[in-house]
Amino acid sequence: MFRQLTIEKSASIILFALLFALATRIPADTDVWWHLRSGQYMLSQGIIHIDPFSFTKLGQPWVNHSWGAQIILYTVWQLAGNFGLALYTSILATAGMWFVYRMSSGSVYLRAFALVIGAATAAVFWSPRPQMLSFLLSTILLYLLFRHKYQQQDYLWWIPLLMAVWGNLHAGFSIGFILLGGSIAGEILGRLFNPQGENILSWNSIRKLILVTIISVAAIVINPYGLQMLAVPFQTVSIGALQNFIQEWNSPNFHERQTWPFVFLLLGLLGAVGASKKRLTWTDFLLTAGTAFMALMAGRNISVFAVVATPVLTRHLDDVLSERGWVVNTVKRVTPRMARLNVVLIGFILLASLAKVLIVLDQKSVNEAQRDILPVAVTEYLKANPPQGNMFNSYKWGGYLIYALPDHPVFVDGRTDLYGDTFLSEGYLQTAGGAPDGQSKLAKYDITTVVIEANSGLARVLREQSSWSLDYEDDQAVVFTRGET
């Protein structure tokens, strides 16, 4: 049995063990918690149609586009806590990279090289949120398109079903339409300008792809919110405060090392295409150029670029290596001694990966990391000293407060599509920044308690106001309460 465990097969097993370990991280994203609270709420109260968590938007219509993913997340949380959330991220990330591996070309060593760069690029935004399901589903959709174009295997009718599921999990279904639209446009250009090229779809296949896309749009409507779901991606990207305030919606900061794999992948792709005699197809050009533009506009799209670019990189690197005769011959059977060595090596890597996962998810380490990032200490204070009246809170802490203080509606949280640009910019950002009219905004919403970052502009202003008393302070947060007027 072990005679077939070649070094190539061993390398692929080792690759995915390492990718799983790479994807494992402590759940400390502040938005995770309002997703968990939403899942908890829906399991007892039913699908959410109006906001139940804030006092500023209480009772207003809310298209909760991640409703299905939230139920999944909360179920995982109930079953296995932080450990389960970490595994949720690791499993979805590894599964997504498996589809990328299947779309890649060349030897297992070339694929492993490219996949490590691609995974390091995408990992910047891997976290236990609904977007992880979008990551996986985008790789599956791209894989179906790959099979149709490069292997002449028609699984296109699976795409509407995939999109119907996706539309009930996360508004990232818009990525699916970007991939479909880019593929259709690329194939049309290929048919017009390079009709004799390799793997160019026929006009009949292009028409079928267009039909599948149209049906997929209709499939998205099969959700608790109907046609409203289609508008969510457009409403989200139109919110200017996202680009101005939220890091993952900003352009990447290339001074941060976590963005460097993206740079390496982008430059490596350009170099491989330039060095290869293989012609870059119109579809590959449109998809890589389009997703690169998206990634340069907003860092959260870097993972989409990684999914698209990694297989293209391998196709052209494999061509470069083949031209030069730098091809590794595949060994189909090995000696018993080599097979035993491979088993030992795999076992060692699996144990090392497991150890890494357990070390990362050690309860003490998890608690320390969450206390450093999340407002755990100030929340403990608020539980012991419940806020009286309306509470103004930090945007980035709102999601955690929704979960940890369910009886106290928040002022704002990460549901940008609910609050809208005007409220976020004028109602929150100006007030939290300590703008001159901030006091009037607090009065407008009848705020009696303020929970904000200790170094915020609003905190500096309130320290100088005799009408506000500082009731709590640590290195992370402050709590002010308004005195009697």
Image (cartoon, rainbow, N blue to C red):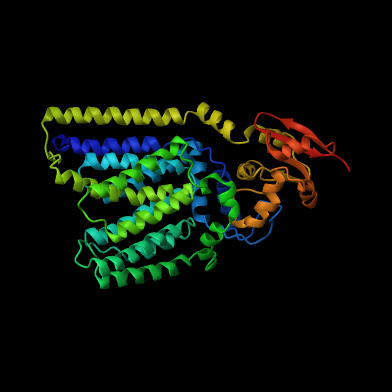
Q: Is residue 98 left or right of residue 166?
A: left
Quadrant in which the C terminus appears = top right
Instruction: Residue at 57%, 60% (x, y): give it.
Output: 63
Q: Position of residue 4 (x, y in %)?
A: 15, 38
- Closest to the observer, 322 or 235: 322
* One can see residue 258 in this view: yes
Q: Is residue 399 above or below residue 453?
A: below
Instruction: Residue at 40%, 44% (x, y): give it.
Output: 122
- Closest to the observer, 411 or 295: 295
Quadrant position of residue 317 = top left
Q: Position of residue 270 (x, y in %)?
A: 31, 48
Task: Determine the residue located farthest toward the right in the rendered image.
Answer: 485
* One can see residue 410 in this view: no
Q: Is residue 368 above or below residue 423?
A: above
Q: Position of residue 248 (x, y in %)?
A: 51, 46
Instruction: Residue at 24%, 36% (x, y): give it.
Output: 11
Quadrant position of residue 484 = top right
Q: Is residue 136 above or below residue 181?
A: above
Q: Is residue 95 left or right of residue 399?
A: left
Quadrant in which the N terminus appears = top left
Task: Determine the residue located farthest toward the front in the rendered image.
Answer: 274
